Amino acid sequence: MAQKKVVEYLKKKKEKINFCLVGEPTNPNRLGEMIKIGRRGSLTGKLTIFGLQGHVAYPHRANNPSIIIVKILNELKEIKFDKGTKDFQPTNLEVTKINIDNTADNVIPATAEATFNIRFNDKHTSNSIKKRLNKIFIKINKKYKSKFKIDYRVSGEAFLTKPNKTTYMIQNIIKKITKIKPKLSTTGGTSDLRFIKAISPGLEFGLVGKTMHKVDEAVSLKDLKNLTKIYESILQNYFK
């Protein structure tokens, strides 16, 4: 990722950044509602179960991976990772894909695949979650005498940036221009601040993200003009 390379370059050059404002679309419905001061981590897992193919009339000669993967996914979904924190929502797992590549109705398949994503708060790391999940995979596959493969992809760890005087200055400017006091939040997906936090405190504030990634993605021209005023006022106040 380009952002990661930029951070590595700045660290190598020993360049200092005092504060960073990332222009993510942070507002759910109206400009001024929300500032992001942290984000949940994101871990995606692709699980493959290797069973034994056979005829449905002779199940004792096969080992059905579809049954095994359903049992695993059910146990994953039942995990209560935490109750959330003062700053974060509870950690949550969602199954996003289940795939069994089988064109015959009377054949027990050889493999079954599933993909899941976990959005986790700062009570966990991606490694601590992997260890917990791996224990479940090992336990259930041992019970059913099957094998498994798990591929993980981590797009970001959970983080929280402690608000400072610049954070509150920005909050006050947003309130002055939009007439709304923005909430300091950690909701939503990952963002570029997950890279920059390694070298600088910061926050995210931008437009309304109600239509993000939709076919008719759009922003209000009024919001765009007001956001320009907000950014200009932040710069003026920061460099007083």
Image (tube, rainbow, N blue to C red):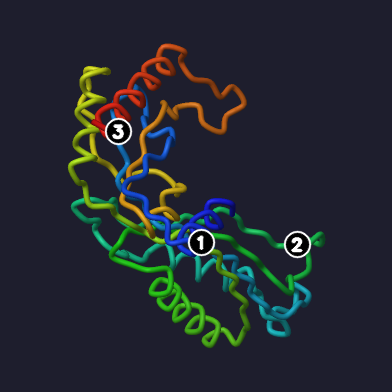
Q: Quadrant of the C terminus?
A: top left
Say whether disc 3 or disc 1 marks the residue closer to the N-terminus: 1
In the rendered structure, find residue 34 and report the number of the disc placed on it: 3
- Say if residue 117 shows up in the picture: no
| Residue drawn at x 51%, y 31% as measured from the top left | 212
Secondary element at image label 3: strand
Residue type (three-letter) at the residue carrying disc 2: Asp
Q: Circle 2 — which element?
A: loop
* Pointer 3 with pointer 1, Cβ within 8 A: no
Q: Residue extending furthest top?
A: 222
* Mark 2 or 3: the one toward you: 3
Tag 1's secondary structure? Answer: helix
Quadrant location, the N terminus: bottom right
Mark number for residue 8? 1
Residue 49: x, y in percent? Answer: 63, 74
Kind of residue sitting beneath label 3: Met
Relative depth, front residue between 48 and 9: 9
Q: CA distance from mark 2 to mark 1?
A: 42 Å
Mark nearer the viewer, 2 or 1: 1
**Does 174 appear above or below 221?**
below
Q: Position of residue 225 (x, y in %)?
A: 41, 15
Q: Position of residue 84 (x, y in %)?
A: 25, 56
Mark 2 and mark 1 lie on one chain; the one further toward the N terminus is 1
**Residue at horizontal 50 percent and vertical 27 percent from the top:** 211
Can residue 159 be seen in this snapshot? Answer: yes
The residue identified by callout 2 is: 101
